[in-house]
Image: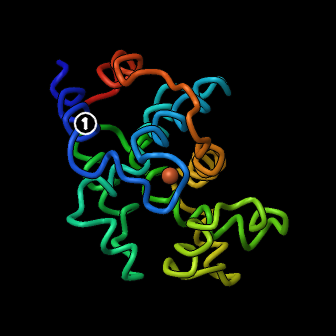
Amino acid sequence: MGKVYDEIETIFTTGISEEYLGEDVKLVEHMLQCADLARSAGAPDYLVVASLLHDIGHLLVDDAPGAQDAGVDMHHDVVGAKWIEDRFPGSVSEPVRLHVAAKRYLVTTNHDYLAKLSPASVITLNMQGGAFNQEEVIDFISSVGAEDAVRVRLWDDLAKVRDKETSALIEFKEAIDTLAL
Ligand SMILES: [Fe+2]
């Protein structure tokens, strides 16, 4: 008990957690803001933890900032989901796996959505394949966790406020410990 939390704490406090990846906030702050938004919206714990961990893939790959600068997609969605699925149920890993696809889905189906994305998110959108075609939209909405991925995605897009006070990681420990496999 607590082993997964300890791993998360180590990942959140080392490596590139202090990087911005082109956004206004550090990655670790961004993930805490996202989890706070999920919690304030009354989301269930599995979705709060998915929000907290949605960008963990960025913290697990080598040189994410260098890759981003070079225009290389490191597939942080898939990397993150793989790490999470070894430690949590699919209700946590699948929204993370689909949170980039959810952006592509929202760009395709909601005309106002693109205008609300941060500049960095628009740049990565193109690296990630841009808008979906009709077949990809159908594929996405029939995927397990798609609806939850859209919710995470909308909090993700809002979780980029500079100098916003966030909960500390420890405030998510109980949810993490309860959900960890
Ligand atoms: Fe994010």
Colour pattern of the rendering:
rainbow
- Mark 1 lies within 8 Å of ligand 1 (Cβ measured): no
Q: In the visual, does 98 lie left or right of 108?
A: left
Residue at 68% x, 27% y is 41
Q: Amino acid at mark 1?
A: Thr
Image point (39%, 41%), residue name: 28
Question: How many numbered markers are drawn?
Answer: 1
- Label 1: which residue? 13
Q: Residue 44: where, in percent of width, then height?
A: 55, 26
Seen as rendered, the residue at the extreme right is 112
Considering the numbered disc 1 on the image, is that residue within a helix, a strand or a loop? helix
| Quarter in which the C terminus is drawn | top left
Q: Could you tell me residue 85's position as x and y percent? A: 29, 47
Q: Is residue 109 above or below residue 39?
A: below
Whether residue 16 sits left or right of residue 111 in the image: it is left
Crowding at label 1, few (<14), some or many (≥20) Cα neighbours within 10 Å?
few
Task: Give the x, y percent position of residue 76.
Answer: 36, 63
**Up-down relation of residue 107 to residue 55 (above or below):** below
Among the 4 quarters of the image, the one containing residue 152: top right
Q: Quadrant of the N terminus?
A: top left
Q: Residue at x 70, y 82 (%)?
A: 134
Question: Quick check: 179 above or below 149?
Answer: above
* Residue with the most extreme front position: 163
Up/down of 155 relative to 111, above or below: above
Task: Quadrant for residue 138, please give it.
Answer: bottom right
Who is closer to the viewer here, 14 or 150? 14
Q: In this orientation, which residue lies closer to the viewer: 157 or 79?
A: 157
Q: Is residue 166 left or right of residue 58?
A: right
